[in-house]
Amino acid sequence: MRYLFAFFCFVVCAFADNPNIILIYVDDMGYGDASCLNPKSKFKTPNIDRLAREGMTFTDGHSSDTVCTPSRYGLLTGRYAWRTTLKRGVMGAEGACLIAGGRITLASMLRDNGYTTAMVGKWHLGMDFPGTKNKRDWTRPVKDMPLDKGFDYFWGIPASMNYGVLAWFEGRHAKVPPTLYTSKKPSKIAIDDYRIMPPYQKTPKEAPNPEESGGRRFGLNGKGLEVAEDFVDIECLDRFTSQSLEWLEGRAAAARKGKPFFLYLPYTSPHKPVIPLEKFRGQGKAGAYGEFMIETDWHIGRILKWLDDKKLTEDTMVVFTSDNGPEKTWTKRVELYGHHSSGIYREGKRSIYEGGHRVPFLVRWPAKVKANSKWNQPVCQTDLLATFAQMLGIKLPDNAGEDSDSFFDALTGIKETTPRGPMVNHGSQGRFAIREGKWKLVMEDARKNKRELYDLSSDPKETKNVISAHRNKERELAEKLTALIAKGRSTPGKPQKNDTPNWRDLVWMVK
């Protein structure tokens, strides 16, 4: 009996140290769009608030970039995306995956250490589709996609909806292939928005020209997008959640026996198209956007309820964060509703300023993380790889997680923690900033913007450029940024190579 008890304790302890992990990644949600972070929010997010109440809030948490593709790369690899060939903007739906073959990802590391792994949702890191537009053979498999980057299971869509190739993919195939065509259609629901919904056409030429309906001012320049007959934009959140729950249901018994799971759930909200289901219309006081956030929160609640019902809440780590700050329609919400999607922070999506990359960042793990706790030092989404590695007792090789700095000690309440090394912020047009402690140095760029220095401890809104009074700090931070770019990493370890030589945005290095 004594040996049985000892074995039972060993299994329980091992399970607690290797929790199930659900990583929920929303799209274009600002810091002020979570009611737990914004007391003046014009809508409530009770399930997101629950994660904060029952876990740790990282008040100084950041995405690694200010737009979709590079942030997702950083999240999954622990490496800044500007080290790759992608220096500005985002990818489309089709193309060589930005994550190189053989690179360690969150999924591959966890899979290789006993986890069953799945992704359900939006990928947006490139896929190799069979054939070319108008000459597809959808009986052939999709390559260079999530199943090749550490995920055992994939169900979702290739990218943001404005890039097309829209179908419900499971594994390497779409059950209903995207053999029809469409264009962005003006939305009657939200501000300056579009829809992807039937009717669809048989050829690209038959697809309507969005500009003819006055859609140019809404950015409706997508024509001839490939789409499946059964695809409708408004179904994404429900389908992603339902498919996640179906997959989780098949993992519950094994999880209770010590076989952990990892689910990466990247939602498409509140990114355009802003399309709340009818049942959420009229809720909140921030128009369709607020309704869409309320719906997103409700779907997150479905995931949390499943964990409760299966008695898996205690030993499951739920990470919740966003790929960047809010879309530029945030200005209209301030004007019309008095709702600040960026909270107190400056600007939003695409911007090098805090509103572009300071995002909600919550972690709940009841078995290890103190409820209603806060961490007020900088952390980045790239840090998840090193954090999970430390949790599992794994030493990352030098060519993995080059920009990943573990926050596991902070997460689990160890009082003596090492301050995070310098963190790099990166705008969608290529502008750089470096953050260390309270200081943030924004670099000059190819568009003739000059350097700026902010003390975020006294000026979190970035209203006062203090560079003229702190020239030594400017030089110190600029030297550190130059060194970590040249070294191919921002963490200790053997220097690595960036994927390209220095590029034009590094104006202070390529003069």
Image (cartoon, rainbow, N blue to C red):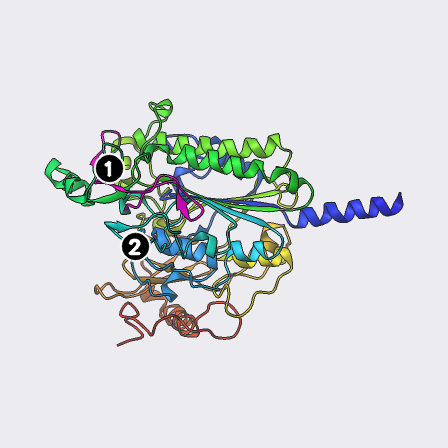
User: Which residue is denoted by mark 2 in the rendering?
Assistant: 131
Q: How many marks?
A: 2
State which region is magenta: 164-189
Looking at the rendered structure, the secondary structure element under dot 1 is loop
In this view, the residue in front, 341 or 168, is: 168
Asked whether residue 254 appears in the rendered view, the answer is yes
Q: Amino acid at mark 2?
A: Gly
- Provide the major secondary structure of the magenta segment: loop
Residue 163 in the image: state x and y as whole percent.
28, 47
Q: Residue at x 55, y 31 (%)?
A: 305
Q: Quadrant of residue 448?
A: bottom left
Asked whether residue 328 appears in the rendered view, the answer is no
| Disc 2/disc 1 C-alpha distance (Å) | 31 Å
Badge nearest the viewer, 2 or 1? 2
User: Which residue is denoted by mark 1 in the rendering?
Assistant: 193
Label 1 near label 2: C-beta < 8 Å? no
**Mark 2 / mark 1, whichever is N-terminal:** 2
Q: Is disc 1 surrounded by few (<14), some (14 to 19) or many (20+) residues within 10 Å?
A: many
Left or right for 37, reference 89: right
Q: Quadrant of residue 332?
A: top left
In this view, the residue in front, 125 or 377, is: 125
Residue 217 in the image: state x and y as whole percent.
15, 41
Residue 510 in the image: state x and y as whole percent.
28, 76
- Position of residue 443 relative to residue 48, above or below, is below
